[in-house]
């Protein structure tokens, strides 16, 4: 609820698929190459050329359909969406209208510790358009067609979201699912995920308000800003006695405003009709089932498992599960050993994350294999080295393929757990700190910490701290 | 059936000269009157599962055409790009 | 002996036996072009220099004893909507008047492998929309039998060139009769193959679900030779059929004994000239007297087919022709104010009236609020028509009908009356709607000496029955007769 209004949000999310070739021709599907070099007569829309559908696009869309619990339509078709624009060489986009590849699904998201189910209306396949380049120095616009025919899936949600936070959680969940499936690079800065946002507001108990559609939303944080702006704009319109128009608006993230592109009256008439150059898509049931079996455990499922089985908190569970690399690493450590998931989590989100960020690298590309981390944790747990010494070891084995025990040996990191040696240290420290001993006996319990600290110092940090503490206590109470 | 020739021309990105407007309108009228005579048939999706599409393997081909060859027919090319009137203010 | 009154099949034998050379034959074709092209105006672009060069290369290959196709060295004209790498492909439109494709249509690659000699690009109705070749931006092709009359269309240049000896054979394309109708008007043989038999890759699209490239020749065997070379699966055309084709030429049996022929009564009802009706029924009688079994059949939805055809073809055309916007290729208006104005001026100046009419009709039938009543209904009717043909073909092997209800009309006679012009397609469009193969072969002349076409229709991928029946009939009536120009 915002200012007494309920907010209704639906999202149309476009994800570029990371296939080798384009959707309807054999041109390379790659971002950032020199203008008009990844084109051919087909994606340039030359007279007489015909599209051929890339098998992998169908597979990837079906996988996403499975991941979002959709019904897969084994018989579907492609349609033409007709409109004129210089980035669309054929003047129609091949998409799916009447029968999409996937429909009637849902995805569970987590917002503020609550689970929420968002309906997925449909997922369909289509082609991306080219790009227009503008320069103040040049009187015209320049057309680069490299992106024409890059495969997209469009994921259309039900109007099930009630806040920009839910929209963000939904988008983040989709992103991590796409990464888990390995079908999209999810590089936001390259536009590999984009969305159109439908927003309306209404008073509680009243029917849904008129919605506006916002285009040009290029990041998740822009989606949040755009939605918040649009919600406030619509409420202001209503509060001042106005009517919200059904229209298409463009989000200008730099200025932080949405501007009207066209109203319902000027709505484009896309004249959809079945693409006559492509026959009916028929996917056999075995193929659909085989693709389903390739779907890994998905991030939203993992999240719940991490909380319930391993006692991680929501923040930790989210941080690990939403990142396919981290989750895989975590699972491998936990599944192949008896070390505590808590320790693995602490390392993964602590020192490992720090190292990853500092070096812009994934843990998988360091020398710290899951086996190494498990070994390190086991050694620390056994008391052979201290936590502090553990960090010293970590700093080495993350960068070099070294044997842990050799490092402990070389750097003399092993803890002293021999009680006669520890007693000798204790005796010496107690005799040098009589005042503290007296303080303790007079009830100043924090003197204990000081004394243990002195012992650790005397041992050059190698004393086993819990044994040391026990010995001091024993001596003080005798 | 009245056909809004101006609206249809706009959707088609065509401009019909004033002096031809009337002839176009009456021709279109007659053609539409002719073709609209169709029997009623039960609705069904336009799918034909008996004649399915053959899919292409996901394999990229490069170097078949140079950019110059592909833009050789374009009326206006600058720096390898096709040029159109400005699309933004 | 005038080489150009001989059939391609005969010339192929002579080339093989080295009684003539391809260079001589090609020279002969070009000297015929020089003498009659002024009157006929069949070509948009001639490619003499390359043709002679190519002919010599083929002669050299033959001299070296290389195994060659029966088509090797035969001069063939190409309809100007079939993409030819490095050679203008205009679709007889101002819009593409300067367009040179950077690639070959699949049929051109195939014909090159067969060592044919391309004479040039043949005139047509603009973007294949028309039935008279009068909508060409460049010129009006004349009927070799009477140059005051149209050659038919849209492949009018192809049929006229073959009839007049300006090419030995030609490729045309047929969306609603565009091969068969001009073949009938010009007294030659034309085949519209089964939808999917010939790759459409590189054929500039008019109506994608109906278009097919096909051969035009002076005799049945010529069309079989050319069809053998161009048919077959093409991975670049998703609608091409993944089947193996036999050599239709080598399988021709000129015998109709026991052949079950159906006479669809709807094709003989209204608007058909008596001379056409008589000629077609006489042809059927001749086949019957040679052992065919004839019965009347019914295709009840035929009356609606023309309507469905104009809806479907125009809808697809409105979308297919939207790409001509002055950005990537072709014509761009000289003066304009902004993007939309550039689009509108370019398209209004670049397209002729008939193309504009079809684009607008197609835009209308797809537009919001009208789709279901027009486009969807037409597509549903298309299924019903196909089903009716399936039923009939479970009973008979072949259908016989007129190709066109009349003989060639006068230039200018129908050009201002689209409805009358569209009605000339009445016997041919249904075949495209159903995706079937059909052939037009000459079956006599009317009282003005104008050729009449007999249309043979068979079930999908059963071109062989067409070739067999047509060959039998052709042998009975004595084959191609060339017009006096």
Image (cartoon, rainbow, N blue to C red):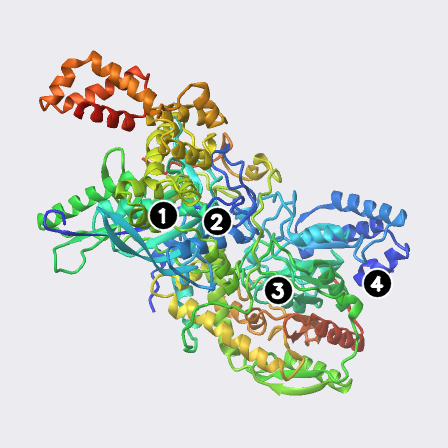
How far apart marks 1 and 4 lie (CA) works out to 73 Å
Q: Can residue C103 be seen in this view?
A: yes
Q: Can residue C35 be seen in this view?
A: no
Which residue corresponds to mark 2? A90
Q: Give coordinates of residue B32: x percent, y percent.
A: 41, 68
Q: Does C307 appear above or below A46?
A: below
- Are circles 3 and 4 on residues that touch, CB within 8 Å? no
For disc 4, the marked residue is: C10
Q: Position of residue A180 (x, y in %)?
A: 42, 46
**Along the viewing direction, whichever of B74 and A273 lies nearer the viewer:** A273
Question: A353 left or right of A253?
Answer: right
Position of residue A130 relative to residue A459, above or below, is below
For numbered disc 3, what is the local secondary structure?
A: loop
- SS at circle 4: helix
Which dot, 2 or 4, sits closer to the camera? 2
Report the residue that reaches farthest toward the front: A478
């Amino acid at each position: 609820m915002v200012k007494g209004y309920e907010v209704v949000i639906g999202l149309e999310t476009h994800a570029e698929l990371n296939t080798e070739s384009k959707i309807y021709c054999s041109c390379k599907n790659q971002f950032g190459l020199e203008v008009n070099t990844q084109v051919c007569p087909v994606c340039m829309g030359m007279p007489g050329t015909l599209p051929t559908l890339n098998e992998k696009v169908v597979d990837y869309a079906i996988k996403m359909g499975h991941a979002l619990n959709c019904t897969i339509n084994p018989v579907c078709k492609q349609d033409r969406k007709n409109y004129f624009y210089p980035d669309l060489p054929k003047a129609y986009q091949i998409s799916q209208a009447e029968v999409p590849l996937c429909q009637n699904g849902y995805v569970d998201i987590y917002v503020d510790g609550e689970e929420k189910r968002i309906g997925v209306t449909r997922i369909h396949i289509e082609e991306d358009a080219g790009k227009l380049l503008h320069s103040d120095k040049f009187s015209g616009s320049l057309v680069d067609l490299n992106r024409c025919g890059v495969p997209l899936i469009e994921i259309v949600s039900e109007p099930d979201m009630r806040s920009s936070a839910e929209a963000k959680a939904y988008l983040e969940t989709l992103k991590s699912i796409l990464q888990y499936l390995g079908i999209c690079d999810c590089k936001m800065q390259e536009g590999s995920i984009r969305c159109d946002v439908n927003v309306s507001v209404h008073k509680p108990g009243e029917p849904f308000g008129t919605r506006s559609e916002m285009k040009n939303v290029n990041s998740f944080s822009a989606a949040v800003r755009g939605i918040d702006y649009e919600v406030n704009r619509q409420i202001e319109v209503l509060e001042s006695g106005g009517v919200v128009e059904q229209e298409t608006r463009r989000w200008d993230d730099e200025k932080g405003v949405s501007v009207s592109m066209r109203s319902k009256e000027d709505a484009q008439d896309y004249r959809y009709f079945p693409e006559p150059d492509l026959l009916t898509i028929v996917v056999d049931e075995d193929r659909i089932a085989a693709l389903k079996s390739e779907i890994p455990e998905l991030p939203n499922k993992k999240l719940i498992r991490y909380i319930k089985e391993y006692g991680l908190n929501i923040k930790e569970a989210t941080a690990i599960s939403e990142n396919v690399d981290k989750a895989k690493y975590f699972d491998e450590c936990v599944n192949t050993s008896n070390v505590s998931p808590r320790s693995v989590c602490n390392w993964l989100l602590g020192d490992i994350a720090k190292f990853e960020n500092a070096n812009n690298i994934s843990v998988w590309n360091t020398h710290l294999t899951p086996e190494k981390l498990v070994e390190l944790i086991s050694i620390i747990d056994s008391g052979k080295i201290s936590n502090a010494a553990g960090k010293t070891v970590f700093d080495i084995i993350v960068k070099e393929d070294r044997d842990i025990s050799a490092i402990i040996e070389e750097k003399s990191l092993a803890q002293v757990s021999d009680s006669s040696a520890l007693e000798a240290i204790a005796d010496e420290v107690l005799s040098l700190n009589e005042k503290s001993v007296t303080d303790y006996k007079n009830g100043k319990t924090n003197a204990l910490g000081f004394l243990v600290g002195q012992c650790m110092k005397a041992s050059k940090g190698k004393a086993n701290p819990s044994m040391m503490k026990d010995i001091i206590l024993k001596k003080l109470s005798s | 059936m009245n056909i809004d020739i101006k609206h249809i021309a706009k959707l088609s990105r065509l401009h019909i000269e004033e002096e031809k407007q009337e002839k176009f309108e009456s021709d279109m009228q007659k053609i539409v009157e002719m073709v609209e005579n169709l029997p009623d048939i039960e609705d069904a999706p336009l799918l034909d599962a008996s004649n399915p599409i053959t899919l292409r393997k996901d394999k990229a081909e490069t170097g078949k055409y140079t950019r110059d060859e592909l833009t050789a027919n374009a009326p206006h090319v600058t720096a390898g790009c096709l040029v159109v009137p400005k699309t933004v203010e | 002996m005038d080489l150009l009154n001989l059939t391609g099949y005969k010339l192929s034998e002579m080339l093989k036996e080295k009684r003539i050379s391809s260079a001589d034959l090609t020279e002969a074709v070009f000297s015929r072009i020089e003498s009659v092209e002024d009157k006929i105006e069949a070509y948009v672009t001639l490619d003499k220099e390359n043709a002679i060069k190519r002919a010599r290369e083929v002669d050299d290959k033959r001299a070296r004893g290389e195994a060659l196709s029966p088509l090797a060295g035969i001069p063939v004209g190409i309809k100007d909507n079939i993409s030819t790498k490095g050679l203008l492909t205009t679709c007889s439109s101002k819009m593409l008047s300067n367009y040179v494709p950077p690639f070959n249509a699949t049929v051109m690659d195939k014909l090159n492998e067969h060592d044919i000699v391309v004479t040039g690009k043949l005139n047509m109705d603009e973007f294949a929309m028309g039935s008279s070749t009068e909508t060409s931006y460049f010129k009006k092709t004349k009927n070799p039998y009477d140059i005051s009359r149209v050659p038919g269309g849209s492949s009018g240049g192809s049929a006229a060139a073959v009839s007049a000896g300006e090419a030995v054979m030609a490729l045309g394309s047929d969306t609603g009769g565009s091969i068969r109708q001009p073949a009938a008007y010009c007294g030659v043989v034309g085949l519209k193959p089964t939808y999917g038999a010939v790759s459409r890759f590189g054929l500039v699209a008019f109506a994608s679900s109906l278009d097919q490239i096909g051969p035009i020749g002076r005799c049945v065997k010529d069309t079989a030779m050319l069809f053998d070379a161009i048919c077959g699966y093409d991975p670049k055309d998703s609608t091409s059929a993944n089947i193996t084709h036999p050599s239709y030429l080598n399988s021709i049996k000129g015998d109709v004994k026991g052949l079950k022929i159906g006479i669809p009564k709807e094709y003989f009802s209204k608007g058909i000239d008596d001379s056409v009706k008589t000629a077609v029924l006489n042809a059927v009688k001749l086949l019957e007297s040679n052992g065919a079994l004839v019965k009347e059949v019914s295709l009840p939805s035929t009356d609606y087919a023309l309507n469905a055809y104009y809806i479907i073809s125009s809808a697809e055309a409105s979308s297919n022709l939207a790409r001509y916007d002055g950005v990537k290729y072709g014509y761009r208006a000289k003066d304009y104010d902004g993007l939309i104005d550039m689009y509108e001026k370019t398209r209004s100046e670049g397209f002729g009236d008939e193309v504009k009419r079809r684009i607008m009709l197609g835009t209308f039938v797809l537009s919001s609020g009208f789709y279901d009543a027009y486009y969807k209904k037409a597509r549903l009717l298309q299924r019903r028509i196909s089903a009716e043909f399936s039923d009939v073909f479970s009973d008979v092997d072949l259908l016989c009908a007129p190709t066109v209800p009349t003989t060639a009309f006068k230039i200018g006679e129908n050009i201002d009356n689209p409805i009358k012009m569209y009605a000339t397609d009445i016997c041919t469009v249904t075949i495209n709607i159903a995706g079937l193969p059909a052939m037009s072969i000459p079956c006599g002349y009317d009282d003005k000496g104008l050729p009449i076409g007999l249309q043979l229709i068979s079930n999908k991928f059963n071109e062989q029955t067409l070739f067999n029946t047509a060959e039998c009939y052709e042998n009975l009536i004595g084959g191609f007769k060339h017009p006096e120009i």
